[in-house]
Amino acid sequence: MATKKPTWIVEKERQKRAEDALTVWLFGIHAVRDALLNPKRELLKLVVTKNAADRLADAIEQSGITPEICEPRKFSAPLDAGSVHQGAALEVKPLKWTDLQSIAIDAGPHGRLLFLDRVTDPHNVGAILRSAEVLGAAAVIATKRNAAPETGALAKTASGALERQPYVRIRNLADTMEEMKALGYILLGLDGEAEDTMETVIASTLANGPRPIALVLGAEGPGLRDKTKATCDALMRIDSAGAFGSLNVSNAAAVSLYASLQNKSV
């Protein structure tokens, strides 16, 4: 008689099959072009209008994919009605950035990471990826659950950064934060109610020379969870000039990342 598999193994196998079957539709000229030119992308299907095909001719030729040409009024890609696709949509497999430890180590003493705690809005995550790529962060890290998945909207907001900036999905945020601590990273959490300002904390962190830093940001509204706060080495706030309120998470990520780089010791 065959031994029945434990429930947790059955569930893990189910999740693995679901992940393997997952595909993403990217849309928009820039997002599609960048994906076509990314050798790490597994390309499945390209749907374009004649005009879009002409604009993407070089990328299509380089990728080797055969496009499906359709009329603008009969665009056949399964996109949301409000998607601004510009006549181009590409079905792909999600990128898999798995070796966070190597990424973190290779970044060296000036390395910068961004941890996202329950940031679910794809436009915010896309904007964070774009800032991270422009400012030289090594990776953006979020959980597999309760975080924005790779989508066409995210890719379009990222404006090409999704194909370049590692967006690493992990199972447990606190455990991964501890792993980065073990590699020498200083974990600085953004918290609007923190006693110390961002400038003070970053200056103190880098007072004795360069240190790799991981910035930890929470969703707008709830912010960082208690366990996430407790896992950080320090909490800091971004001071506002008036009483309007706080920055959204994508702006806070850009400001804090830029500040950490401006204050680094050479």
Image: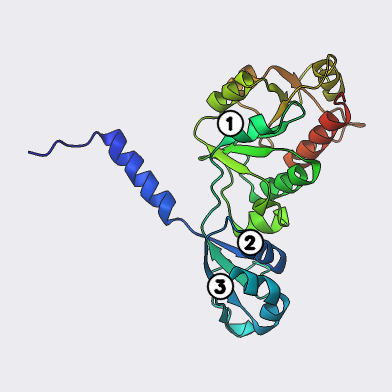
Kind of residue at badge 3: Ile
SS at circle 1: helix
Between tags 2 and 1, which lies in front? 1
In the picture, the disc for residue 65 is: 3
Give how far across and how far down residue 7 sits, in percent: 27, 35
Residue 170 can be seen in this image: yes
> Could you tell me residue 50's position as x and y percent?
66, 84
**Residue nearest the observer in this picture, 94 or 146:** 94
Which amino acid type is shown beneath numbered disc 1? Gln
Looking at the image, residue 91 sits to the left or right of residue 250; the answer is left
Disc on res. 35: 2
Location of residue 241 (image quadrant): top right
In the image, residue 79 above or below residue 154: below
Q: Residue at x 64, y 70 (%)?
A: 62
User: Is 172 on the left-hand or right-hand side of 9?
Assistant: right
Q: Residues within 10 Å of mark 2 (few under 14, many from 20)?
A: many
Mark 2 or 3: in front is 3
Determine crowd level at label 3: few under 14, some 14-19, many 20+ residues with C-alpha closer than 10 A. Answer: some
Q: Would residue 14 appear left or right of 221 to someone viewing this image? A: left
Q: State the quadrant of the N terminus.
A: top left
Along the viewing direction, whichever of 92 and 42 lies nearer the viewer: 42
Tell me where residue 63 sits by quadrant: bottom right
Q: Which residue is mark 1?
A: 101
